Image (tube, grey):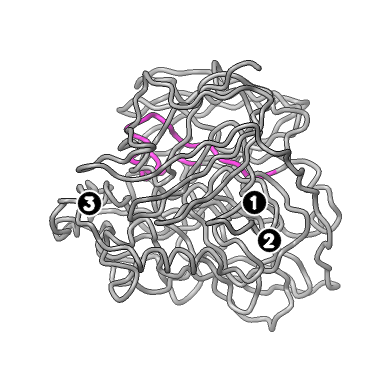
């Protein structure tokens, strides 16, 4: 989760202080005027009145221990809210179908690429083999070709909210921004807890888009590729300000995914605190009350909302907040954090937007929040500590430890069944959400201050000037995988490294 602390603002304050004390470096990119595309829509996703009921993607679940599914990536004209849009889709849907499995299940996905570009699939957050027919991001599936992904969810895999999206290096940002993303849910012990089971459940896939007058996604331009492309159409499950219902006295379990290429979300729900119950890698030990939360690209959280207010509409709000663009877009203060890195130039880009609206319908006997959830395993002291420095190079290149990604190079080699600490140091001027494939980790400290609670993560936001220490066990699987910035234009432009997990 982006904001780490019971008061819900610790990391936000760190980001703002860090970016205030750093000067804009220019980077030789010139002005950003050309970025504001004349053909982009001026419409915004903000709406005063709630729209239609929140749609849930078609979902497919395992039966008798097997999840078998055909998945097709293709360009298609679809409805985005009330607009016609030419997007990239999985099975003609934005977001793609929700897939659900249980620990121990076998997953067989027969994937077909009907795009005009090479692509592949990444199963973000799943602890499965990184090679062969598993979570193999080095695959190149050419247009017109297919590949069958087949793997087993481990018997001890935690329940959680995971997702799938393309990961063909150089085209990741373009394809995800085009619409290619879907949820992958593992059902397990958390789902069977009585208090959790009694709650209503809703999935929110948060994603931004940009469309020109013909419904096409415009060329992002050089500056947007540098800072990370941001669209002026903000959607939840492909809708503008959909409505959610809760009975008075009820509990609503919101599963939130930031499926944006570059956009950060800073969320709050009017007069309702969030009760955090799970982060990227699954449940935490006990609920934590938050007034707001930040989701960096790729992050997920699960929160409970109590239906204990007067029965009227309440807005789920997103504050303008994009630390990846803060210094490139005119600074954190005054000019607005979305600023000039935005595709479109919506008049609402510097204002609070409504993501969805919560309404009350009916009443039930009040449900109580759980007091305990799942113990978070303490990790032993690390055998090794490594440092990874994040920065940008000349022009349009982003670097880890001074190097841009090279497919033929092994950047980090680790041994199976070991535990390591990684210090992620951001010496640049933009925030970078750091993501590791295959194995999850725990955040140990931020600028030397201990993390306020234990949680499993696979994305951690590192703001300018920060050093974040994570602790990671390498378990079960050997082979090559990657770590990278999840502002995906940064990853495509070099901020990725190859991780080789060797037998012990």
**What residue range appears in magenta?**
160-181
**Percent position of residue 396, x then y:** 23, 42
Q: Give the left or right position of residue 406, taking residue 352 as reference.
A: left
Residue 165 forms part of the magenta stretch: yes
Judge left or right: residue 30 versus residue 176. Answer: left
* Crowding at mark 1 (Cα within 10 Å: few <14, some 14-19, many 20+): many
Kindly indicate whether the residue at mark 2 contacts the one at mark 1 (C-beta within 8 angstroms).
yes
The secondary structure type at the circle numbered 1 is: strand
Residue placed most toward the observer, 223 or 268: 223
Could you say which is closer to the camera, residue 305 or residue 280? 280
Q: Which mark is residue 259?
A: none
Instruction: Answer above or below: position of 415 versus 222.
Output: above
Mark 2 secondary-structure assignment: strand
Residue occupying the point 58% across, 77% down: 270
Query: Are the residues at dot 3 and dot 2 in contact (C-beta closer than 8 Å)?
Result: no
User: Taking 209 as reference, is 354 above or below it?
Assistant: below
The alpha-carbon separation of the residues under discs 3 and 2 comes to 36 Å
- Residue at 36% over, 60% down: 233
Q: Quadrant of residue 168?
A: top left
**Tag 1 residue:** 279
Q: Quadrant of residue 287?
A: bottom right
Find residue 242 and report its horizontal and vertical position in percent: 52, 64
Task: Return the x and y of residue 385 as percentages of the image width and height.
Answer: 57, 36
Work out whether residue 42 can be spotted: no
**Residues under labels 1 and 3: Cα distance?**
32 Å
Query: Horizontal placement of 16 versus 190: left or right?
Result: left
Are the residues tagged 1 and 3 within 8 Å (C-beta)? no
The image's mark for residue 223 is 3
- Mark 2 or mark 3, which is nearer the start of the sequence? 3
Q: Is residue 128 left or right of residue 179?
A: right
| Tag shown at residue 276 | 2
Q: Say which residue appears at 77% left-offset and 29% top-offset.
A: 155
């Amino acid at each position: 989760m982006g904001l780490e602390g019971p008061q819900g603002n610790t990391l936000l304050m760190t980001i703002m202080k860090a970016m205030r004390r750093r000067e804009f470096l220019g980077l030789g990119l010139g002005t950003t005027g050309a970025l504001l595309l004349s053909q982009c829509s001026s419409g915004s996703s903000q709406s005063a009145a709630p729209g239609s009921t929140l749609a849930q993607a078609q979902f497919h679940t395992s039966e008798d221990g097997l999840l078998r599914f055909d998945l097709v990536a293709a360009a298609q004209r679809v409805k985005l809210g009330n607009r016609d849009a030419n997007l990239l889709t999985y099975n003609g849907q934005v977001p793609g179908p929700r897939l659900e499995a249980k620990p121990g299940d076998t997953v067989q996905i027969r994937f077909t690429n009907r795009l005009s570009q090479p692509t592949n699939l990444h199963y973000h957050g799943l602890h499965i083999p990184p090679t062969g027919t598993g979570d193999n991001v080095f695959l190149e599936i050419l247009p017109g070709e297919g590949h069958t992904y087949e793997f087993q969810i481990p018997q001890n895999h935690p329940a959680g909210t995971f997702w799938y999206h393309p990961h063909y290096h150089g085209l990741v940002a373009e394809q995800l921004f085009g619409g290619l993303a879907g949820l992958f849910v593992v059902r397990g012990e958390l789902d069977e807890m009585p208090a959790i089971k009694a709650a209503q459940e809703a999935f929110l896939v948060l994603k931004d888009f940009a469309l020109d007058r013909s419904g096409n996604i415009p060329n992002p331009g050089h500056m947007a590729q540098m800072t990370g492309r941001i669209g002026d159409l903000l959607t939840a499950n492909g809708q503008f300000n959909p409505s959610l219902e809760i009975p008075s006295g009820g509990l609503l379990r919101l599963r939130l995914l930031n499926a944006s290429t570059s956009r950060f979300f800073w969320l709050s729900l009017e007069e309702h605190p969030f009760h955090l119950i799970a982060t990227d890698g699954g449940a935490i030990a006990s609920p934590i009350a938050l007034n707001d939360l930040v989701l960096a690209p790729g992050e997920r959280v699960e929160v409970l909302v109590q239906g204990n207010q007067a029965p009227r509409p309440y807005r789920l709000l997103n504050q303008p907040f994009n630390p990846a663009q803060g210094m490139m877009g005119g600074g954190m203060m005054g000019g607005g954090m979305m600023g000039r890195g935005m595709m479109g130039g919506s008049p609402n880009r510097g204002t609070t937007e409504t993501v969805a609206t919560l309404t009350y319908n009916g009443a039930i006997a009040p449900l109580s929040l759980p007091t305990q959830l799942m113990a978070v395993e303490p990790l032993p002291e690390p055998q090794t500590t490594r440092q990874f420095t994040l920065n940008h190079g000349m022009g349009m290149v982003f670097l880890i430890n001074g190097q841009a990604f090279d497919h033929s190079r092994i950047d980090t080699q680790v041994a199976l069944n070991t535990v390591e600490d990684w210090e992620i140091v951001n010496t640049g001027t933009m925030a970078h959400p750091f993501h590791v494939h295959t194995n999850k980790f725990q955040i140990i400290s931020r600028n030397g201050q201990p993390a306020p609670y234990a949680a499993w993560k696979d994305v951690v936001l590192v703001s300018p000037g920060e050093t974040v220490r994570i602790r990671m066990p390498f378990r079960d699987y050997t082979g090559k995988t990657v770590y990278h910035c999840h502002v995906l234009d940064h990853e495509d432009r070099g901020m990725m490294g190859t991780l080789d997990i060797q037998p012990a």
